[in-house]
Amino acid sequence: MRLELENLDRMVRGYAYFLSWRTGLRGTEPDFTDDMRNAKAYAYQGDAESFDAGKKFNPGEWDNPTKWVAIRTKYFAVAVIPKDKEGQAVRFRGEEVDIGEKAAWKKYGFDLEMPFEANRERVEDNFTIYFGPLDYDIVKAYGVGLENMMSFGWAIFRPFGKMILWSFNALYKIIPNYGWVIVIFSILIKLLLFPLTRKSYQSMKEMQRLQPLMQEINEKYKDDPQKKQQEIMNLYRAHGVNPLGGCIPMLLQWPLLIALFNVFRTTIQLRGAPFILWIHDLSRPDTIAHLPFSLPLYGDTVNVLPLFMGVTMFVQQKMTMKDPKQKAMVYFMPLFFTLLFNRFPSGLNLYYALFNLFSIIQEKVVPYHPPTEEELKERAKKATKAKPRRLKHDYRGRYYKQK
């Protein structure tokens, strides 16, 4: 777009003019609320700064060199990119427009302040206007950082999100069906995380083997919490068991799993992509029936994949959680995630359901082999050398008799 201004010496003061966008960007998706949940305005001032007014819309202003300014929804964006020079400031505004059916349109606008030289009667500025999908490869090709609008989450998750999206698109070139791409992708991710999940599983089994002795300590020192904690730590050292050994491998997986969540929820590649049978759009829930009422969090639709995901989560937790204190979590977590994920895209639910299913298969196919007596002695020896401390009770011999 070329913009020509004349007679500036008589019409404009301050040696700047404003290029304004006041019409907002309307939502395009059937779930309008979810579409607006991703609506934001952006300005690139050395880095992409977002303006999300939320429920209280207050004008925002940034008086810094501006490379581009944009408004986005879940899958689409409009961006104004000055070509000859940068803007010198941008002002955002927003309002919630009630469109009925308990939905509100987040209507964003902006004023891009463009400078010009003093004593100029005529100015000609050129702009690139992007109005299209939030496809990473397309927006990145403009070379001005438009890809920073992509929903990869916090900075710590962005490298993982980019890697996931690249792998996702690479698989699609080989298997031109995004449903099967998700199936293959979930297998590859499971193989990638196998060392961590295996380590966590082994550590969990080690802790389960110590449960009888831990219960005995709890009973013996129930009135002396400090002594009880001391004896439990002695027990861990005697067997070379790290009580955090099961948590640390799981925590290391979280950046990747959260990045997967962000990518699968907002990637335009899944929009309108069918899979098999009743799954016609991987970006939407796989609804097979509607309820005559709406449940809190769950909604009013019956979707298959969230139920399947909940069942596989229950089976997996039933296999791994043996602590009686965690019995309630075995039932609560699958139920909670089933309710929470019911309105999420079927592609996301398909991935998590398959991930749970492959975890169940992994635990069945790769059995746990308890350490031998020699291995336990070696562990205890190393632990004693690392932290020389006299143990009041010899838990090791009693532990061996339980095998």
Image: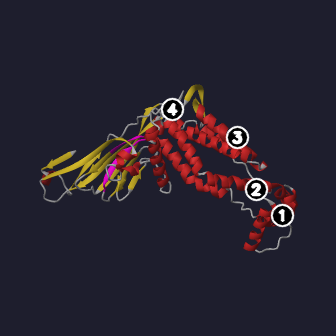
Q: Residues within 10 Å of mark 4 (few under 14, many from 20)?
A: some
Q: Which residue is mark 2?
A: 207
Q: Secondary structure at mark 2?
A: helix
Q: Secondary structure at mark 4?
A: loop
Q: Residue at x 77, y 58 (%)?
A: 371
Q: Which residues are magenta?
A: 66-78
Q: Which residue is mark 1?
A: 396
Q: Earlier in the sequence, mark 2 or mark 3?
A: 2
Measured from the top left, where is residue 375 in percent x and y? 77, 63
Q: Which residue is mark 3?
A: 315
Q: CA distance from mark 2 to mark 3?
A: 20 Å
Kind of residue at disc 4: Phe
Q: Which of the two residues, 118 or 160, is positioned nearer the viewer here?
A: 160
Q: Earlier in the sequence, mark 4 or mark 2?
A: 2
Q: Earlier in the sequence, mark 1 or mark 3?
A: 3
Residue 209 visible in the current orientation: yes
Q: Earlier in the sequence, mark 4 or mark 3?
A: 4
Kind of residue at disc 3: Val
Kind of residue at disc 2: Met
Kind of residue at disc 1: Arg
Q: Which residue is mark 4?
A: 275
Q: Residue at x 78, y 48 (%)?
A: 324
